[in-house]
Image (tube, rainbow, N blue to C red):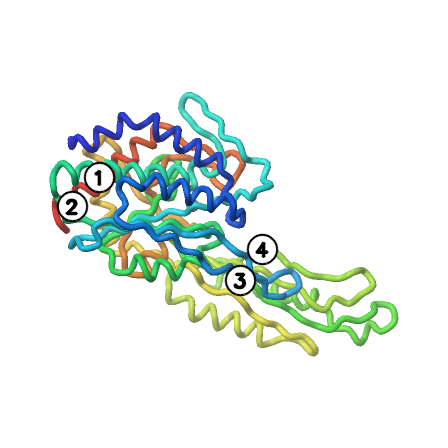
Amino acid sequence: MDPAITWLDSQQAAMEKLLIDWASINTGTYHLAGVQRLADEVDRSFEEIAGSVLRLPLSPHHEINASGEAVEMPVGDALVISRRAESPLQAVLAIHLDTVYPVDSPFQTVTCTDEQIAGPGVADAKGGLVVLLYALLAFERYVEASGDTRLGWRVILNSDEEIGSPCSAELFGRYAAGADFGMVYEPSLPNGDLVGERGGSGNFSIIARGRSAHAGREFDQGRNAVVAAAEVARQLHALNGRWPGATFNVARIDGGSPYNVVPDVAVVRLNIRYPRPELETEISAALAKICGAAGDGITLQQEGQFSAPPKLLSLPQEALLQQFQQCGQSLGIGLEWQRSGGVCDGNRLAALGVPNVDTLGVRGGNIHSTGEYMWRASLAERAKLSASFLITKSRAGN
Ligand SMILES: [Zn+2]
């Protein structure tokens, strides 16, 4: 085994310490001070291996509030760190700095047992962030010792993944397109399996506007937006079953008014999951039809988009998974892959034509809940897997 890989075993304690430090910083997507602090720390930790570092402000996230108005929600910076951009083979590695836990979440503290570390983001995705860093530290030891410079890399760290990467999607287009392969550090499945293919996702808001009126004095003059929204919700829900594998989740209806007022605005929140990219056109037409059929005195306005196209198990995708499987075998790690309905930045890389494995982070579970945990041993284990893969690719030169 390459000495750069065995070196990682000696780094287990350092990796654990770093994970505990990073998970102790609250980086809820909209907690800018926390995200910026983590970006500073991560920037510093890459210092010894980075060729260039870009710190990029992202444009704010456009949201529709409960009154149907567009509001701007600022998010933290992204980091793009590169080395050997001139090498013939280029890898792009990515993971997010943000977590789902807002600054006022009750889940803020990291706790350790003999085998596990529990805390906000320990698996999703700060464990992966540590794995990514140490895999590259090990890989650069290999480069230093061997003089093999055939593989260059670029790391993209965004800060809005947990809200669907609306502000960093363009960043992937600019800095990831053209890479030969991608490595994304979302947690593996709890049993250590990887995700092979993923469905697509889109979030939409449909704003129903009517006419406000006093419920007692001039009820007939009013046009009830809540009732219109409810009708839209019913029609959206009825789309379930029309396309096999596609789901329509009416997640929320915002809006309303005091008891004595006919409400003039309500917003229906919808998440769509779909298995094949070509369904976007048909589904869009169905949404347009629903929004075009508003009742008298009601307008329906659709906002939102399909933000993560389905990631299919293409031939290059499968070949990459097999190469990881082989690296795993040489390290005594059995790796299989499964389909997932969840989306991540692996979807966005695949849409750019970059085949990628997107579950290279730690083994862990209960993500997005106050029970989130990770298996300590998976830090060195998964860093060795990634480092071994990078060394194999660099040696092969393709
Ligand atoms: Zn994640």
Q: Amino acid at mark 3?
A: His
**Camera-nearest residue between 99 and 342:** 99
Could you say which disc has been placed on residue 251 in the image?
4
Which residue is labeled 1 in the image?
A: 139
**Camera-nearest residue between 187 and 26:** 26
From the image, state whether disc 4 or disc 2 is nearer to you: 2
Please say whether residue 344 is visible from this viewpoint: no
From the image, state whether disc 3 or disc 4 is nearer to you: 3
In the depicted structure, whether residue 102 falls above or below residue 174: above
Q: CA distance from mark 4 to mark 2?
A: 46 Å
- Label 4: state its secondary structure: strand
Q: Amino acid at mark 4?
A: Ala
**Camera-nearest residue between 177 and 42:** 42
Q: CA distance from mark 1 to mark 3?
A: 39 Å
Q: Amino acid at mark 1?
A: Phe
Label 4 CB sits under 8 Å from any ligand 1 atom: no
The residue positioned 75% from the left and 62% from the top of the image is 257
In the depicted structure, whether residue 190 falls above or below residue 93: above
> In the drawing, does residue 338 fall left or right of residue 302?
left
Q: CA distance from mark 2 to mark 1?
A: 10 Å
Q: Amino acid at mark 2?
A: Ser
- Label 3: state its secondary structure: strand
Q: CA distance from mark 2 to mark 3?
A: 41 Å
Could you say which disc has been placed on residue 394 in the image?
2
Could you say which disc has been placed on residue 62 in the image?
3
